[in-house]
Amino acid sequence: MKTENQKIYLVDTTLRDGEQTAGVVFANREKIQIARMLDEIGVDEIEAGTPVMGGDEKEAITAIAKLGLNARIMAWNRAVIKDIQESLRCGVDAVAISIATSDMHIKDKLHSTREEVLEKMVKAVEYAKKEGVYVSANAEDASRSDEEYLIQFIKAAKEAGADRIRYCDTVGIMTPLEIYDRIKRIRQAVDIDIEMHTHDDFGMATANAITGVSAGATHVGVTVNGLGERAGNAALEEVVMALKHLLGFDMKQDTKKFRELCEYVAKASGRDLPSWKAIVGTSIFTHESGIHADGAIKNPRTYEVFDPDDVGLTRRFVIGKHSGTASIKKKLGEYNIFIEDDLANVILESVRKTSVELKRPLTDMELLNLYYEYVNNDIEHAI
């Protein structure tokens, strides 16, 4: 669990793993803008891409490395000297050196052996350290790796000079309980920083990431909106707020800019930002249900863990089928119309009927029309 003054480092890989989402391509200007926004928010490290791809990819990474950002700029590499040389030419501060550690990947993908994997990783790490850059040794498919061999890999990486290892739950098959036990055992076996890199194939990326931190991981790999291959990665906005509000870490990121960042990345990636998206979706602070709205009006904390302004959103009360009189009175009060409970109940009946007919909530104007219809009818009957 959290120790006093413990810092958790955010490693954002939106520009690398995020762009590897099938069908997603960022323009260079978008990559540069995303890097600037991530730096403004306060991420510790930006994994900017894969230099050995060359072309626009290498140009964008080089440009980001020259921005003078506070965040450390990392490039992704295979355990191949040529890859690392291309990264160094881009002027990055750090390199991620990735190679598979599960027997399935070693045999079926790499057509290699455990011994050859260790040899390649050690040579690549030693080369990078001689060049004076920070090194993350990435264990791809760590979750399906033999644990004894994985620990051997980590020990060899540390001895070769690696600054941290990246534990990759590559296909998102771990549960939080399994992650906790696995990371705890690794921490006990090897004294080295651990980065959690979790995928969301079973909807557990964020849960596994913060559980890894609880077990002793020091770094968390994230992407904006949870963008990433297949079902995506742990979402930056979810991880930060969970670490802050659920685990009690003193996270320094400027969360008020989350919604702006998430909207920009959604547009650049061509992926809609759902209203129900955790943390930054507009529905998080939108209330319709009568009981919920009544509670939120009296004390927002009854149904909101943090203020909408904390993530760049605003609170909204929607008038529809499930509304109650408290919402009706509050919404009309925004237009300086103050009514008693009896009238609110009458209007609520019309609201619910209209909402069912329209199959949606009412706009403010539609609610006002219902109010004025009742008032005008009441006047006509009185004459």
Image (spheres, helix red, strand yellow):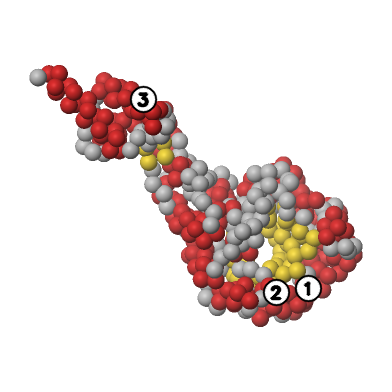
The first of marks 3 and 2 along the sequence is 2
User: Which of 237 and 157 lies nearest the eye of the viewer?
Assistant: 237
Tell me what residue is drawn at x 76 percent, y 59 percent. 140
Q: Which residue is mark 2?
A: 52
- Disc 1: CA contacts within 10 A as few (<14), some (14-19) or many (>=20): some
Residue 125: mark in rendering: none
Vertical order, 366 against 14 (above or below): above
User: Which of 167 and 170 lies nearest the eye of the viewer?
Assistant: 170
Residue 149: image quadrant is bottom right
**Element marked by disc 1:** loop
Q: Is residue 260 left or right of residue 228?
A: left
**Element marked by disc 2:** helix
**Residue 262 image point, x, y percent:** 50, 55
Distance between the Cα atoms at labels 3 and 2?
62 Å
The first of marks 3 and 1 along the sequence is 1
**Residue 7 image point, x, y percent:** 59, 58
User: Which of 187 and 206 lies nearest the eye of the viewer?
Assistant: 206
3 or 2: mark nearer the eye:
3
Q: Is residue 171 visible?
A: yes
**Residue 269 image point, x, y percent:** 55, 59
Q: Which residue is mark 3?
A: 353
Which amino acid lies under the numbered mark 3 shown in the image of this protein? Lys
Q: Which residue is mark 1?
A: 80
Tell me what residue is drawn at x 30 percent, y 38 percent. 364
Which amino acid lies under the numbered mark 2 shown in the image of this protein? Val
Vertical order, 233 against 377 (above or below): below
Tell me what residue is drawn at x 72 percent, y 60 percent. 166
